[in-house]
């Protein structure tokens, strides 16, 4: 970029950051994520470092935030409420350390305190003679808003310090213990004389994640609109003109700084180390984090910080990073600041989890069972090093409830292993041209009408011959946990279905080399390392190999609703072939571990469908008919062969018929009355005469579980 273009970019950046600052700090309605904002600031700072002569007093780097809103009285802070420079990773943190060490080598011996960087709202609390007299928001760092009445409703804020401490459990009862984080230490007593005449502390007001979830659940149950995230909700709560509304929100606080200290008598002295300061504030009765640690050297401080990057979900609040602070506060103060960022501390940011982007459209996918699922098509955006182009929208009710519209700017979250999902639209950025989204009236793949069942959220395509469902079926059939046919990728499957060569999963076993060659698209030929002939050969070998997969794999591959790898393995242990599984009643199926009434019903339903019958016939004809050797059918020998049972009483969740069938399928014999030939009395709930007789004859009485155990 030449200087002219760069200057242009600089101006553009300043405008953008001003805009976002205003949205975030004044209106409490951000339209961008922290990560995107941080990126703009980093770029601006870079330009400014290269061209210090360009920096104007109106640059966002020259102030921490935007002006306060007019709704509340203004409060001038006794000292500037500073912000923090960011470090994105360990290298950045080391670079910060090197910079400050070069400025003053006492840094080497000063020690470091690491604290969580809570994603809440900075507040400034004033105490005169130990009484809470004023509370302000941060505003632009110089002047904030008087939100005393609202802050008074936050229970974690002590109204008088020191909080009476050291009471025994009896006097305290169990009241007000709260979570670990907001609990105050009651062990040490601080005399009133240890409170300065005038004390101003700074902390972070926030909503704990659990409370936020509870709040949203309650709103959802009442059919009300839910909140987007804890930070926005906390911000909105503090800006209420009516403190009663603030009081109804689960706000809490953690403090971490003394902004101002004034004392006329000689004691107490102001804490001059961060660690000591935290201890002191804690002892006064302020809520102070339990996560803070002190370290002698920077590497240990960074190592601790990094562990919390992985464990951030364990924190009861949302944290967007950790703060590394030079422990020696005299030294830290002496080092001064750059713009509004003190040199003595650095914010070590965790990778972002939420970003905003444009919702380009909503696509509908057809699942294996015909369920229609909406999928967000997004303007590609980076979250945590991954480019996200799609995100889940859960279901059509979710879209309606959040009023998500194509064309909206949406907040997208990607955390840990969770699939990216759309949190909701940024309402303030609507142009008015966005139309509400209506669920599809027809299946996007086959055009048949979509159906909705009573009491269910999902919409379905009930057309059994729907090609999209078939693609998903085949995909599942060949997947690794099922028949494991490598090389049968989605593109080839789609082509085979399109040309009519595959009409159901059984058709895979009659494919010929020329069929596969025709289905390997030009694109595949290019990208694949192997020539098409080789691809076809490999695929035929994989198909051939899959014929020898055990029964449990084939049961999994059928894709019966609710039957995963574990239930399939259990089923194959009890039913040695698909013929026997197909013939099993719901009651008998429920005798299998992990099979409840719903799965049993789904299995019976699956085998009752003509289309599935045909598939099974074709599989059998193709020789894909594995038998399991674990147990045997009714006529052969099994785990219960040679044993005679009498079944009595009601067995919770099972019919007597089912239990009888189960015994017989494992080779046992069932009779009606107890005799000396009876091996076991399978006993349910109600005691009967048979129990007495068994006891007399010495016949062992067992329950359903023991019977099951005998067969595994
Ligand atoms: S120290 C000079 N410590 O993060 C002191 N800030 O830009 C500067 N924050 O606006 C702040 N937790 O609201 C500090 N343990 C913590 C913090 C923390 C959250 C916020 C604070 C500030 C922002 C940094």
Image: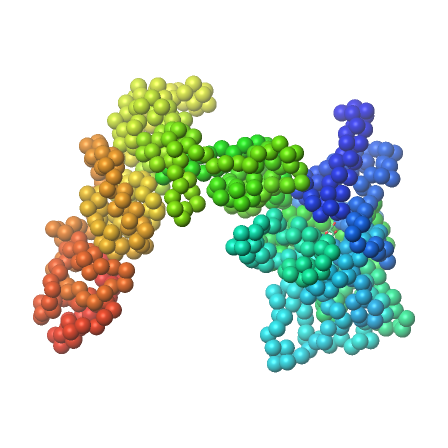
Residue 72, horizontal then vertical, whole percent: 79, 54
Vertical comparison of 630 with 411: above or below: below
Residue that appears at 72% across and 49% down:
347
Residue 622 figure quarter: top left
Q: Nearer the viewer, residue 211 or 479?
A: 211
Q: Nearer the viewer, residue 226 or 664?
A: 226
- Position of 221 with respect to 550 (left or right) is right
- Position of 491 with respect to 9 (left or right) is left
Vertical comparison of 528 with 169: above or below: above
Residue that appears at 20% across and 60% down:
656
Residue 203, horizontal then vertical, whole percent: 74, 59
Residue that appears at 71% across and 60% down:
243
Residue 214, horizontal then vertical, whole percent: 56, 57
Residue 640, horizontal then vertical, whole percent: 16, 58
Quadrant that contains the N terminus: top right
Quadrant that contains the C terminus: bottom left
């Amino acid at each position: 970029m030449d200087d002219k273009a760069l200057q242009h970019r600089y101006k553009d950046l300043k405008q953008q950051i001003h805009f976002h600052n205003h949205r975030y700090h004044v209106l409490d309605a951000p339209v961008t994520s922290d990560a995107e904002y941080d990126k703009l600031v980093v770029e601006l700072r870079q330009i400014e470092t290269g061209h210090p002569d360009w920096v104007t007093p109106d640059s966002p780097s020259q102030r921490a935030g935007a002006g306060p809103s007019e709704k509340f009285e203004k409060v001038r802070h006794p000292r500037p409420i500073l912000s923090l420079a960011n470090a994105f990773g360990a290298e950045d943190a080391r670079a910060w350390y090197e910079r400050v060490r070069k400025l003053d080598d006492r840094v080497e011996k000063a020690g470091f305190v690491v604290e969580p960087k809570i994603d809440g709202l900075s507040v400034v609390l004033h105490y005169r003679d130990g009484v809470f007299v004023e509370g302000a928001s941060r505003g632009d760092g110089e002047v904030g808003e008087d939100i005393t009445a609202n802050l008074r409703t936050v229970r974690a804020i002590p109204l008088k310090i020191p909080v009476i401490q050291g009471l025994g459990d009896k006097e305290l009862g169990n009241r007000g213990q709260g979570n670990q984080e907001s609990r105050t230490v009651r062990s040490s007593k601080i005399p009133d004389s240890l409170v300065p005449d005038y004390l101003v502390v700074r902390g972070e007001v926030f909503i704990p994640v659990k409370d936020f979830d509870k709040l949203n659940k309650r709103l959802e149950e009442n059919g009300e609109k839910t909140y987007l995230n804890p930070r926005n909700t906390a911000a909105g709560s503090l800006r209420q003109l009516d403190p009663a509304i603030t009081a109804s929100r689960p706000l809490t606080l953690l403090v971490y700084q003394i902004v101002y200290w004034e004392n006329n008598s000689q004691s107490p002295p102001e804490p001059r180390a961060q660690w000591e300061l935290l201890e002191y504030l804690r002892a006064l009765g302020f809520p102070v984090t339990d996560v803070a640690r002190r370290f002698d050297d920077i590497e240990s401080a960074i190592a601790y910080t990094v562990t919390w990057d992985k464990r951030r979900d364990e924190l009861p609040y949302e944290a967007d990073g950790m703060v590394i602070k030079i422990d020696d506060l005299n030294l830290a103060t002496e080092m001064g600041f750059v713009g509004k960022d003190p040199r003595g501390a650095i914010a070590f940011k965790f990778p972002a989890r939420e970003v905003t982007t444009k919702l380009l459209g909503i696509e509908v996918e057809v699942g294996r069972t015909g369920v229609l699922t909406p999928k967000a098509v997004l303007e590609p955006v980076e979250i945590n090093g991954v480019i996200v182009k799609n995100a889940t929208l859960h279901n059509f009710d979710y879209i309606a409830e959040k009023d998500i519209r194509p064309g909206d700017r949406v907040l997208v979250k990607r955390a840990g292993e969770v699939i990216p999902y759309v949190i909701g639209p940024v309402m303030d950025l609507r142009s008015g041209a966005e139309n509400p989204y209506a669920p599809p009236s027809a299946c996007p793949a086959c055009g048949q009408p979509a159906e909705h069942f009573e009491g269910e959220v999902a919409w379905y395509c009930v057309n059994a011959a729907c090609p999209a469902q078939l693609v998903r079926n085949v995909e599942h059939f060949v997947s690794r946990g099922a028949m494991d046919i490598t090389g049968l990728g989605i593109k080839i499957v789609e082509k085979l279905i399109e040309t009519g060569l595959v009409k159901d999963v059984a058709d895979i076993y009659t494919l010929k080399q020329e069929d596969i060659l025709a289905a390997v698209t030009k694109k595949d030929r290019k990208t694949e390392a192997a020539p098409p002939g080789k691809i076809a050969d490999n695929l035929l070998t994989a198909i051939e190999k899959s014929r020898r997969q055990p029964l449990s794999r084939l049961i999994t591959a059928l894709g019966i609703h609710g039957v995963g790898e574990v239930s399939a393995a259990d089923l194959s242990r009890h039913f040695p072939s698909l013929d026997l599984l197909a013939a099993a009643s719901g009651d008998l199926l429920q005798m299998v571990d992990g099979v409840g009434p719903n799965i049993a019903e789904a299995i019976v339903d699956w085998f009752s469908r003509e289309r599935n019958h045909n598939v099974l016939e074709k599989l059998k004809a193709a020789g894909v008919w594995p038998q399991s050797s674990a147990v045997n059918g009714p006529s052969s020998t099994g785990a219960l062969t040679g044993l005679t049972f009498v079944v009595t009483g009601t067995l919770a969740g099972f019919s007597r018929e089912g239990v009888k069938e189960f015994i017989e399928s494992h080779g046992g014999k069932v009779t009606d009355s107890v005799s000396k030939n009876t091996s076991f009395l399978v006993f349910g709930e109600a005691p009967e005469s048979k129990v007495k007789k068994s006891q007399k004859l010495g016949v062992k009485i067992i329950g359903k579980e023991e019977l099951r155990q005998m067969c595994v």
